[in-house]
Amino acid sequence: MTEEPSDTAHREVPARVDSELSRAERTLRDAGIDSARGDAEWLLAAVLEIDRGRLLIVDGLDQETRDRFRGLVDRRARRIPLQHIVGTTSFGPAELAVGPGVFVPRPETEFLAEWAVGIADGAGIVTVVDLCSGSGALAIAVATMLPNARVWAVERSPEALEWLRRNVASAPPQVRDRIAVVAADVTDAAQMHAMLPAGSVDVVVANPPYVPQAARVAPEVAHDPADAVFGGADGMSVITPMMPIVAELLRPGGVVGVEHDDTTSAAVLDVVGAVGAFDDVRARDDLAGRPRFVTARRV
Ligand SMILES: C[S@@+](CC[C@H](N)C(=O)[O-])C[C@H]1O[C@@H](n2cnc3c(N)ncnc32)[C@H](O)[C@@H]1O
């Protein structure tokens, strides 16, 4: 009987590498990290500057490599995000530089990119706006997957804008040439109207700060900028003023998808409904089955 290739790394890596990985896994698990084995493998792959899958063919670690690896494991055990330690993260088809000053993109947000592409694929030129763009994850992923898209990436934080500009500049020319970076506040109607005329946008995606201020969060979240994560006492401080502006930007028939906290689906549905300019307003779940997104169409 043949075995599935998944999870073979643990059993098949050469002994010295495997024992070093097992030691790291224990350290990370003791620090409360659920993804301890995977994180250990990512860190070792980063030290060796190889793909994680190639750990299988590494036949030993010299002292210097081992010491560097243990140094990274110690940092991760202090709950510094894996992505900050290795300096990059993947988001759909995009490879992004991340670090202090910018929000680390989360896998659940890929739903918004796929949803936008599913709606806009096959149309003519599509105008897409990514509000609260951060590292540019959504903007770059959508521009990569939708060759007919022109994408506006809107961000307010000067530190995040540096990462955003760097990531857009690193994208392939056929992608970056279709992305405009805009320094603006998504809750400021005048700034948003200066960006694009009313009624000119086909698709808006937004992953705004939305965690209620008093929510308990994982230790790693302390490394994201607070104004990227928290949306006031109720998690709605950006979403509420943003939605009427989104309605003005969209053309009739244009669509919006917004990510929100899993406790605020009803509040977001209320806010979108109260704008009085949307139909087909839907709550959607993330992969864990939690309500995480609201999508709607401009009437
Ligand atoms: C949750 S992060 C999302 C980043 C990125 N879209 C992603 O999915 O990884 C929210 C981002 O919104 C930015 N932001 C917060 N308030 C804003 C505002 N009023 N106008 C524009 N950007 C804002 C933060 O700086 C942060 O980069």
Image (tube, rainbow, N blue to C red):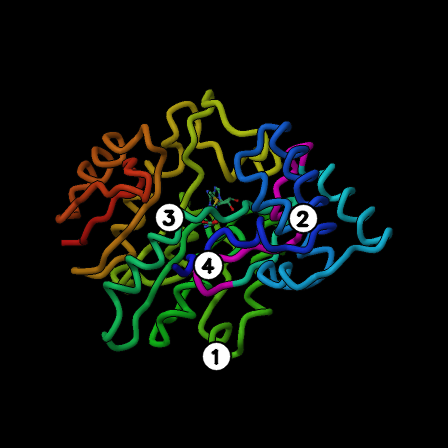
The three-letter amino acid code for the residue at tag 3 is Ala
The verdict on residue 68 being magenta is no
Please, what secondary structure does the residue beneath circle 3 have? helix
Please, what secondary structure does the residue beneath circle 2 have? helix
Q: Quadrant of the C terminus?
A: bottom left
Stretch of the chain drawn in magenta: 77-94
Q: Which of the labelled discs sits on residue 18, or is there none?
A: 2
The three-letter amino acid code for the residue at tag 1 is Gln
The three-letter amino acid code for the residue at tag 4 is Pro
Q: Front-most of 149 and 27?
A: 27
For the point 40% across and 32% down, the residue is 237
Choose mark 2 or mark 3, whichever is in front: 2
Say whether disc 1 or disc 3 marks the residue closer to the N-terminus. 1
Please, what secondary structure does the residue beneath circle 4 have? loop
Q: Which residue is mark 3?
A: 189
For the point 34% across and 53% down, the residue is 112
Cα–Cα gap, marks 1 and 3: 31 Å
Tell me which corner region of the image, top left, top right, bottom left or bottom right, holds residue 220.
top right
Say whether disc 2 or disc 4 marks the residue closer to the N-terminus. 4
Q: Which residue is mark 1?
A: 174
Cα–Cα gap, marks 4 and 3: 52 Å
The reply to whether the C-beta atoms of the residues labelled 4 and 3 are less than 8 Å apart is no
Does 25 appear above or below 86? above
Say whether disc 2 or disc 1 marks the residue closer to the N-terminus. 2
Q: Front-most of 236 and 54?
A: 54
